[in-house]
Image (cartoon, rainbow, N blue to C red):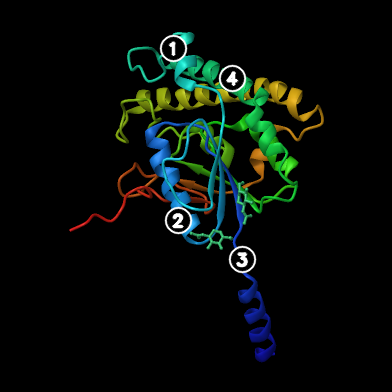
Amino acid sequence: MKLCSFVILTILLRNISAANILIVGLLDSVSHRIWYEQLIGGLVEKRHNITLLSYADAKLKVDNYTVIKFDAKPQEIMDEIQIDIINNEISFLENLRQLWMWLTMTAEIDLKSDSLQTILDYPRDKFDLIIFEIFNGQHLYSLVDHFGNPPVIAISPMGLSPNILDAMGGHSFSYYPIYCSRYNDQMNLLQRAQNWIMYLIDNYYKWTNIPRLEILAHDKFGNDITPIYDIEKRIQILLANYDPILDYPIPLPPYIIPVGGLHTKRSTP
Ligand SMILES: *[C@@H]1O[C@H](CO)[C@@H](O)[C@H](O)[C@H]1NC(C)=O
Ligand SMILES: *[C@@H]1O[C@H](CO)[C@@H](O)[C@H](O)[C@H]1NC(C)=O
């Protein structure tokens, strides 16, 4: 029996081969990119072949890493509709409204783009794994169906925001300060109530906007696509930019793997 397992293991190990991995990491913000290009570098080093869908060209120059560039210019769209989602002066509600308006506008452009057609023309069995940067890109979740339902995992360079916790397990915590608040984990009752309501509002915007993205996706992928929420439930693990030592404590299910500081490199002496 032992010999048998040994033989099987040896055969399996010999057959381990590089995977073709599709990463949907559209956003070209420095803080997101330094994070997932570090991940890409690690995957390429392990001889996997990476295809990234993004609004920007590759900054990392390595073999077996291809970027399919999407045409939407997120910054120009922001300027055009005169929004400023990183502005601290505007209210939380206005900030969320602008964020989702912007996400919907970029989604509309993405779904009509030739770049999407380029990736759709790839062989249907091309990818062994799809990774979504879960901040945006929900309008492209139908790629999972299109490529024959390979395993899906998610990454979150932004840490744990309410919409991400909602996707991965559905918590609305009162004691974990929401990303946009100025609270820490020492909140009084009133502040905790406010924090919890902000969680709900943040999710409310997601729940009302995802159906809009789905309607846009129907035009490209057809009417019988798997609902975005069902694809979301197929996400098997989330690698989150969260560090239990540096961030506020939060109980996490085992499939949320904290990899805070992934982007840091060993410094030279
Ligand atoms: C790139 O992929 C090819 C084919 O799988 C492989 O032979 C080559 O070693 C890879 N290059 C690197 C730098 O891993
Ligand atoms: C790696 O991915 C690129 C772009 O998606 C593709 O053109 C190439 O054929 C792939 N290489 C292998 C060895 O599968």
Query: Looking at this view, is 2 or 40 the one in front?
Result: 40
Vertical placement of 77 versus 213: above or below? above
Can residue 171 be seen?
no
Q: Which residue is mark 2?
A: 42
Vertical placement of 15 versus 185: above or below? below
Say which quadrant the N terminus sits in: bottom right
Tag 1 near tag 2, CB within 8 Å: no
C-alpha distance separating marks 1 and 2: 35 Å
Vertical placement of 194 versus 161: above or below? above
Callout 1: SS: helix
Tag 3 near tag 4, CB within 8 Å: no
C-alpha distance separating marks 3 and 4: 38 Å
Callout 2: SS: helix
Q: Name the mark on residue 79.
A: 1
189 lies left or right of 210: left
Q: Name the mark on residue 17.
A: 3
Task: Pinpoint residue 64: horizontal percent, then vertical percent.
Answer: 53, 53
Closer to the N terminus: mark 1 or mark 2? 2
Closer to the N terminus: mark 3 or mark 1? 3
Task: Pinpoint residue 189: horizontal percent, then vertical percent.
Answer: 36, 27
Closer to the N terminus: mark 2 or mark 3? 3
C-alpha distance separating marks 2 and 3: 16 Å
C-alpha distance separating marks 4 and 2: 32 Å
Closer to the N terminus: mark 4 or mark 2? 2
Q: Which residue is mark 4?
A: 104
Can residue 260 be seen?
yes
Tag 2 near tag 3, CB within 8 Å: no
